[in-house]
Image: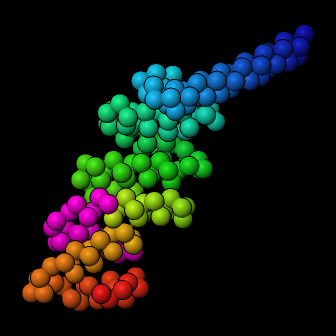
Amino acid sequence: MYKYFLTGLILLLTIYQGKSQNSAEQNYRQGKEMYESGRYDFAMEILKPLTLPGNKSTFSPYAGYYYSLSAIEEGYTFLAEEMLKQIITEYPDWDYQDLARLWLSKMYFDEQNYTEGLATINDIKDPAVKQQSDEIIKSELSLVEDVDTLTNLYYLYPYIDGLAITLADKISNQSLMKQDRTLLLEIIVKFNLNKE
């Protein structure tokens, strides 16, 4: 009798888990649709339960990602930043980690927190996302007027292409008296840049 009860209980739990997974998928898809249709506040509301620590499913990192994008669109940058950090730390094997890092780095750059932005970009592995990150770096760091700031960042992250290219451009635009020719030559050689 006890065996039958236990078997029945296991069967019920399996069915409940399957329904719960289906519900998570439905909520994720509905939240994603809301995001894609520009209804960011509804997307956040629908996706939020899937992102809570006790509610992990295969859809949780995806829900967190679209929750973050919706929060960015709604101007809730703190919520977006925290959610992206949560995705990166709690789902290290998630296939779209690099996209989460890209968005997080963009947010850091928007806050002029260049060190954190570059540190986050430095962890990106996917070549296509890495290329996008170089464009963000060039775009954001081209706004930095202080060459010393860029130089200090370069010494922290000497192998980030976008940073090196932006620094080389800034140095070459300085007057000859101010130019750090040694550093400029180092960047030109290391990154195989045009000397002009």
Q: Position of residue 191 (x, y in %)?
A: 40, 82
104 lies left or right of 170: right
In this rendered view, identify the residue nearer to me: 66 or 123.
66
Residue drawn at 37 percent across, 69 percent down: 162
Q: Position of residue 75 (x, y in %)?
A: 31, 33
Residue drawn at 19 percent across, 67 percent down: 149
Q: Quadrant of residue 179?
A: bottom left
31 lies left or right of 175: right
Q: Is residue 6 visible?
A: no
Q: Position of residue 66 (x, y in %)?
A: 50, 35
Q: Quadrant of residue 79?
A: top left
In this rendered view, identify the residue nearer to me: 54 or 114.
114
The quadrant of the picture occupied by the N terminus is: top right
17 lies left or right of 121: right
Q: What is the magenta segment's predominant secondary structure?
A: helix
Q: Quadrant of residue 188?
A: bottom left
Q: In the image, is residue 157 part of the stretch drawn in magenta?
A: yes
66 lies left or right of 189: right
Magenta stretch bounds: 139-159
